[in-house]
Image (cartoon, rainbow, N blue to C red):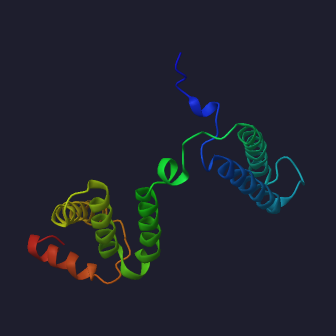
Amino acid sequence: MHDPFPSRRTRRPGEAVFAVLMAALSAVLLVNAYGISGLGALSAPGSVPMAAAAVMLGAAFVIAWRTMRRPRAEGQTLHRDVLPGRILAITALLIAYAALLEPLGFLPTSALFLILSIRLLSRRGWGFASLVSVGSLVAIWLIFRIVFTVLMPSGLVPEAELIQALRDLTGAR
């Protein structure tokens, strides 16, 4: 019979490193939670975060231990099977988006991110990616900025002037 979960018997590339990293991060969280109020009392502000972090750390150690005991999967590579180039490219785009959002503002940063990611993921031309991105961005901006009045970083685009021009065109106040 075919096993639908072959990864339960073998360890995929990068799985052991990820499990150990989760255990280490759980330990850091436990130390930070301890720093809130120490072990003073069960009702102390840090008691729930410490309990949650301790459970996370225990689970992470068990998972890391079990993962390290499994044999490596045959014929799999980290680059091809776990982190292909597209995943790394989208991750880099997300990091760039977060870094550029404040200095450039919502509209130019989102346009750049959407055009590049739609082009990469759809494997279609720049015209298609630009049209879909700009159309989506205009709809998102109108709904969230105008209808719901959500403030977004303006950056390079003079949003206040755009909104006033829209109000002038529609006669809205």
Name the side, left or right, on which 85 lies relative to 14.
Answer: left
What percent of the width, then of the height, locates residue 25?
A: 71, 56
Quadrant location of the C terminus?
A: bottom left
What percent of the width, then of the height, locates residue 163?
A: 22, 75
User: Count of labels shown?
Assistant: 0
Q: Nearer the viewer, residue 155 or 70?
A: 70
Q: Against 101, is 119 above or below?
A: above
- Find the residue positioned furthest to the front: 75
What percent of the width, then of the height, locates residue 74?
A: 59, 39
State which quadrant residue 70 falls in: top right
Q: Nearer the viewer, residue 35 or 66?
A: 66
Q: Nearer the viewer, residue 171 or 126?
A: 126
Residue at 25% over, 56% down: 123
- Find the residue positioned furthest to the right: 40
Q: Nearer the viewer, residue 134 or 12?
A: 12
- Find the residue positioned furthest to the top: 1
Residue at 77% over, 61% down: 32
Residue at 81% over, 59% down: 31
Name the side, left or right, on which 141 lies relative to 167.
Answer: right
Residue at 60% over, 43% down: 12
Name the side, left or right, on which 41 lies relative to 101.
Answer: right
